[in-house]
Amino acid sequence: MLKGFFELLKRFTLPIIVFLFLLYCFLNKSLWTDFHGYIKSFQAPIQKGVLAVLIFLAVSYILRKILTIILPRLFKRLHLNESTGNSVSTVLGYVSVIVAFLIALSVMGVDLKSLGVLIGALSVGLGFGLQHVVNNFISGILILFERPFRIGDWIVINGHEGIVRKINIRSTELETFDKARIIIPNADIISGALTNWTLHDLMGRLTIAVGVGYDSDLEKALKLVVETTKGDDRILTDPAASAVVTSFDDSSIGVQLRCYVGNISQRVQVKSDLIVRIQKTFRENGIEIPFPQRVVTYKKEE
């Protein structure tokens, strides 16, 4: 029981002290007079501060409303996708806040010229430490306006291949076909070679190399390879599939099938199906796919 009493006392001690202090301040008229004089001496700075805060809120609100009305129409006219529009809106939102903040500082009497000199001096110092961040930021803006890829595109960049899931102002998020997420800095994307399989359309070329024996009928082999593409709706007839002889190899003659698929994302499955058909068709028509061979000659000793 005694322990519970101490716990109760400990819990309510601070609120009781605060209440008694406020009661004393309210009843002490001389303290009120001194406090009023203190506030009056700082009346001008407080008024400027309140005015600056109100102007900051008003300007930022007005700019945000203007952007909300104008940007959707502008994005629609420029045919920007949703991700690009969101990124541009975010950047312009930051700019509007900075503009409102500078206007509020000028109301408070801050000299923006001297402030600009200070910011310039700080930017030189910070530039060396944050050059990679700034580089990625500028690269992100270039990506947003050049649009070398969009969300959902299949790209290959710096040895990484996958589907674009997010385009941020600093980096781009890529989902590989193993369902791993790779965060690539935008500066690396701008400075490197980029392959986009789906930038303008989903069509893509598929090639399959196969070796046939030296005793095989090459014209017949080329014809049979092309016929394996017939009847597959995933393979386009325009451009039409073709087959060419590519090389004389050690154990075989190289033949290559070239065809186009309507959806490049189906390329792996289409290639697998064509390889199965080619192997079956060659076997039925007596076309040999030889194993690697070596001819060894023994020289008789005299």
Image (cartoon, grey):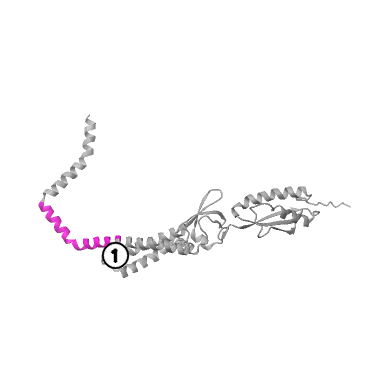
Residue lying at the far top of the rendered structure: 1
Q: In x, y percent, where is residue 64?
A: 35, 61
Can you give x and y, in whole percent of width and height, for residue 179 in the image?
A: 53, 48
Residue at point 22%, 38% (across, down)? 10
Q: What stretch is highlighted in magenta?
A: 29-57
Q: Position of residue 48 (x, y in %)?
A: 23, 63
Residue count near mark 1 (Cα–Cα under 10 Å), binned few <14, some 14–19, many ≥20: many
Residue 56 counted in the magenta span: yes
Which is nearer the eye, 269 or 8? 269
Question: Which image quadrant is residue 127 in?
Answer: bottom left
- Compared across the picture, whether 242 is left or right of 153 comes to right
* Residue that mark 1 sits on: 105
Q: Which residue is drawn at 42% across and 63% down?
A: 73
Question: For residue 53: magenta?
Answer: yes
In the picture, the quarter occupied by the N terminus is top left
101 or 76, which is in the foreground?
76
Q: Nearer the viewer, residue 192 or 144?
A: 144
Residue 262 vs 127, above or below: the answer is: above
Mark 1: amino acid: Leu
Q: How many labels does the image show?
A: 1
Residue furthest to the right in view is 302
Q: Is residue 38 above or below residue 114?
A: above
Label 1: element kind: helix
**Dominant secondary-structure state across the stretch colored magenta:** helix
Q: Where residue 222 appears, x then y in whole percent?
A: 75, 56
Residue 129 is at least partly visible in this image: no
Image side of residue 38 versus residue 199, left or right: left
Q: Residue furthest bottom?
A: 113
